[in-house]
Image: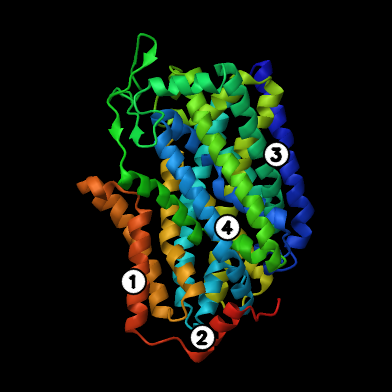
């Protein structure tokens, strides 16, 4: 390694050490009980709630995936996705957060999402708990794999080491402090990481714009590329089928005719916003805040962070097309996701570039720890203690959760072995899975008294099944209208199934309806 690379490594090691210290500091408290370990004892303040929710949600795709989409095919896909996410964030905080915080207390002080759904319907056989826990295990393992890919790409790109080795190093680090500190350590470190992420994005876009000659120059360059700077058109890079690399002629990247981008495409990308209603890592923050009234302030903080971060991430891809139009490492759909790294390492002194690179590491860590911890809690708390061994002690639950962490990480590693994996694509599938499986169920559980256990199960199963069927069968077979993002049709289908199956079967018991009315009226005592 040369001098610059060593400086970058030092800066990142300092950052990683700070995160581990947080894990150690909170380890003692985390091990007091499973509630402390999995939900932090419902003690989060408004700032930590807001910033940790968004940092754990956005993950490495905010700094690599989204700029990569903008760099590769222009504004439309990236911008409409960002708009959908911003709108979804706002409505999730506005209509879901307070009622879920209240209802989770009423539902026997539930500390995990499967437990909330199970207690919400007062089930005895724990079918809802088991089904929801299984889906969390499946989709969060895929989600964690996307974070591992980010780690591998980041370290191999920076230091030239083997992708697989670097991916394993990142996984080991995430596991270390997640096992140590649990939810509270994860939330506090996510707060710190959210600050690093937004600073890294802002610094890079400002420096990039200055190097490019100003915003006007960036926009002029983008407009010269057919369909690149349009909301209703899409640039189409011409790719060599043998190498997967975009063709370059006369020193310029080659683009084909502008692809159509109609209302169906807009709806497809905007549908990303629906995912928020079923995203466990965000919903758990609503449940963990110390006071329901503080969620209003959290919403405002979260929205400012989200709007700035998404807008800047998209614009980084646009700036990158001007500064590095023919950079060989960027001229593939997978390689384009390195544009943030390329901008940082070429624009900043090495030591500062290292801290900016920590922004990517921050985004990745803040998500992967959430995914692994929630998935582990789903198995340990909801399947092991809820179904297999109902009299399991807190110590046994936490031991099983840590073993589960290791197993899930191992599966995620296998899924992340291909260094050509596209982060944005992996995330989009897992996002659709959660959004369709839990989104409609969450909304109906909070706002429709008539939903029953049968409808809840039907909604989860149908939503998840439609995501797989649409993505793996309908889309590749028929294309056209079936090329729409699978979250939208799966969300609609799940909602229909919830209503139909609930109305065709027995109405909820009087006790369940009383719970609903008490929550609706705000008559819930704090845990």
Q: Nearer the viewer, mark 2 or mark 3?
A: 2
User: In the displayed structure, would residue 505 be above or below residue 294?
Assistant: below
Name which residue lies at 48% across and 37% down: 66
Q: Which label sits on residue 497?
A: 1
Q: Which label sits on residue 513?
A: 2
Q: Which structural element holds mark 1?
A: helix
- Residue at image mark 4: 282
The answer to which of 304 and 333 lies nearer the viewer is 304
Disc 2 or 3, which lies upstream in sequence? 3
Real-space Cα separation, disc 4 to disc 2, in angstroms? 26 Å
User: In the displayed structure, would residue 306 be above or below residue 110?
Assistant: above
Q: Which structural element holds mark 3?
A: helix
Name which residue lies at 50% across and 39% down: 149
The reply to whether dot 1 and dot 3 touch (C-beta < 8 Å) is: no
Q: Which label sits on residue 16?
A: 3
Q: Position of residue 348 (x, y in %)?
A: 66, 21
Disc 1 or 3, which lies upstream in sequence? 3
Q: Which label sits on residue 432?
A: none
Image quadrant assignment for residue 521: bottom right
Which corner quadrant holds the C terminus?
bottom right
**Residue at the outermost front position:** 216
The reply to whether dot 4 and dot 2 touch (C-beta < 8 Å) is: no
Q: Position of residue 458 (x, y in %)?
A: 36, 72
């Amino acid at each position: 390694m040369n001098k610059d690379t060593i400086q970058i490594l030092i800066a990142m090691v300092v950052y990683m050490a700070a995160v581990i210290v947080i894990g150690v500091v909170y380890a003692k408290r985390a091990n007091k009980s499973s509630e402390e370990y999995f939900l932090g004892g419902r003690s989060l303040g408004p700032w930590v709630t807001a910033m940790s929710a968004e940092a754990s949600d956005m993950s490495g795709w905010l700094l690599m995936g989204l700029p990569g989409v903008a760099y590769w095919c222009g504004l439309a896909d990236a911008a409409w996705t960002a708009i959908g996410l911003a709108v979804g964030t706002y409505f999730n905080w506005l209509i879901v957060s307070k009622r879920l915080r209240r209802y989770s207390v009423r539902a026997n002080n539930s500390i995990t999402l499967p437990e909330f759904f199970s207690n919400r319907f007062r089930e005895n056989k724990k079918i809802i708990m088991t089904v929801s826990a299984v889906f969390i295990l499946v989709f969060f393992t895929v989600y964690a794999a996307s974070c591992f890919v980010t780690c591998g790409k980041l370290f191999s790109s920076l230091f030239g080491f083997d992708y697989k080795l670097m991916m394993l190093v990142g996984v080991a680090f995430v596991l270390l402090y997640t096992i140590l500190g649990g939810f509270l350590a994860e939330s506090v470190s996510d707060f710190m990481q959210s600050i690093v992420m937004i600073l890294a994005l802002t610094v890079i876009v400002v420096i990039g714009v200055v190097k490019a000659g100003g915003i006007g120059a960036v926009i002029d360059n983008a407009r010269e590329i057919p369909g690149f700077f349009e909301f209703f058109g899409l640039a189409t890079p011409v790719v060599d089928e043998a190498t997967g690399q975009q063709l370059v002629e006369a020193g310029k990247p080659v683009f084909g005719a502008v692809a159509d981008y109609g209302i169906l495409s807009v709806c497809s990308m905007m549908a990303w916003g629906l995912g928020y209603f079923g995203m466990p890592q965000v919903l758990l923050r609503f449940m963990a805040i110390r006071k329901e009234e503080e969620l209003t302030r959290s919403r405002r903080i979260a929205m400012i962070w989200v709007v700035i971060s998404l807008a800047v991430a998209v614009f980084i891809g646009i700036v990158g097309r001007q500064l590095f139009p023919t950079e060989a490492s960027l001229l593939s759909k997978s390689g384009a996701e390195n544009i943030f790294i390329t901008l940082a390492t070429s624009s900043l002194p090495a030591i500062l570039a290292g801290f900016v690179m920590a922004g990517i590491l921050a985004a990745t860590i803040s998500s992967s720890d959430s995914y692994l911890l929630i998935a582990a809690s789903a198995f340990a708390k909801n399947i092991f203690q809820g179904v297999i061994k109902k009299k399991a002690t807190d110590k046994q639950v936490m031991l099983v959760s840590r073993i589960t962490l290791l197993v899930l990480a191992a599966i995620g590693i296998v899924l992340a072995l291909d260094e050509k994996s596209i982060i944005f694509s992996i995330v989009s599938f897992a996002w659709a899975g959660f959004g369709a499986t839990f989104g409609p169920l969450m909304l109906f559980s909070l706002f429709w008294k008539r939903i029953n256990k049968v409808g809840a199960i039907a909604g989860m199963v149908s939503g998840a099944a439609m995501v797989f069927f649409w993505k793996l069968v309908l889309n590749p077979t028929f294309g056209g209208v079936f090329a729409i993002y699978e979250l939208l049709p799966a969300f609609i289908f799940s909602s229909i199934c919830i209503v139909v199956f609930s109305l065709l079967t027995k109405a909820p018991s009087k006790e369940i309806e009383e719970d609903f009315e008490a929550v609706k009226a705000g008559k819930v005592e704090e845990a």
